[in-house]
Amino acid sequence: MMNGKPKIIGVLTSGGDAPGMNAAVRAVVRTAIKRDIRVLGITNGYNGLINGEVIEMDLRKVSSLLHRGGTLLKTARCKEFRTKEGQLKAYEVCKEMGIEGLVVIGGDGSFRGAKALSDLGVPTVGIPGTIDNDIASTDYTIGFYTALNTVVDAIDRLRDTSESHNRCSVVEVMGHGAGHLALYSSIAGGGTSCWINEVDFDVEKDIIQKMKRTLRTGKHNFVIIVSEGITDIHALAKEIEAKTGVESRATVLGHIQRGGSPAAYDRLLASRMGYHAVEVLEQGIGDRVIVVRGDVIGDMDITEALNMTKKADPIMIAINETINI
Ligand code: F6P
């Protein structure tokens, strides 16, 4: 979809927040202003767009923002925007405010909304921001590496106490059905077992027998990583304790995984993607999603991107199973 160079663009964050979203907003604002494009920040995601909640984004609005977690623009999951009526309302608001291009920072659900707006005539570009890294078109999403550091730090701490007490620690990691965060944290944190949806997993074989073998070698502490939504980890911890005799504790890491200052990688990714998103919109092009592949930033058709599927990397699965014994 091509229009002319926009005079005003909007930027919003949508879905679950992710560290680095602020850095992406900052990059969009500063790149656009440098190119004489005015930027309106839309607060509360698509909800805010429907209700016309906008703030003027000048250079100072985004200063001291690069290192801050969360999102200055706030975020929401908006049911109304999934309906045609909601999308039309948002389109009308864009027309009223003179918004001729929009950057949406979020996950796949947010990109579906971006597509709808592009179809209605507001060129919209998506930037992948989610800790889940479950967007197939891009190698990495903004926030993933920061969340990974948070999870690995938590695992290290849990290992300290498990080691002192000769215990097993069962840790639930976020992912929204995708096992990337759990798998990467298992490799980086040295999980005894890692249970994700993408692999065939048998508690008896992959946890109980493995722990019993390891106990015979003289190791008495364990970290079991489970991707969220698979099982009740409190019940699992009880089962492990009953079957192995190793005292076990369950920890759901929860929303701490979403907060915190973005890692340098996420700040860089956000800055590069924000800059590229404005370059795309500047040409009057919409209906695109910004991606990174092999450290090259590019863009791709939203529909094409949404039709792609991302499996857990088989090499990472093999590495985890080989090294974490
Ligand atoms: O998509 C990001 C994510 O943090 C998922 O990992 C998790 O399943 C979900 O959001 C939690 O959402 P909420 O903030 O609505 O509890």
Image (cartoon, rainbow, N blue to C red):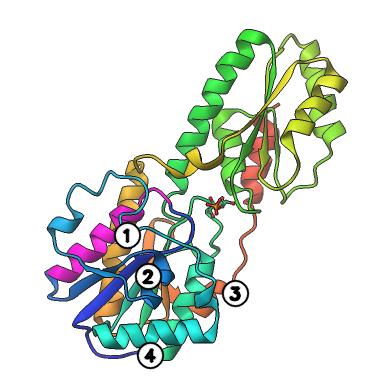
Answer whether residue 223 is magenta in the image. no
User: Quadrant of the rendered structure where residue 71 is?
Assistant: bottom left
Residue 43 x, y percent position in the rendering: 33, 65
| Residue 307 tag number | 3
Q: CA distance from mark 2 to mark 3?
A: 27 Å
Span highlighted in magenta in the image = 18-33
* The CB of the residue at mark 2 lies under 8 Å from ligand 1: no
* Mark 3 sits near ligand 1, with its Cβ under 8 Å away: no
Disc 2 crowd, CA 10 A, few/some/many (<14, 14-19, 20+)? many
Q: Which residue is mark 1?
A: 73
What is the distance, in whole Å, between disc 1 and disc 4 at their CAs?
Answer: 24 Å
Q: CA distance from mark 1 to mark 2?
A: 10 Å
For label 3, the SS is: loop
Q: Residue 145's image quarter?
A: top left
Of marks 1 and 4, the one in the foreground: 1
Q: Nearer the viewer, residue 139 or 35?
A: 35
Q: Is mark 4 within 8 Å of ligand 1?
A: no
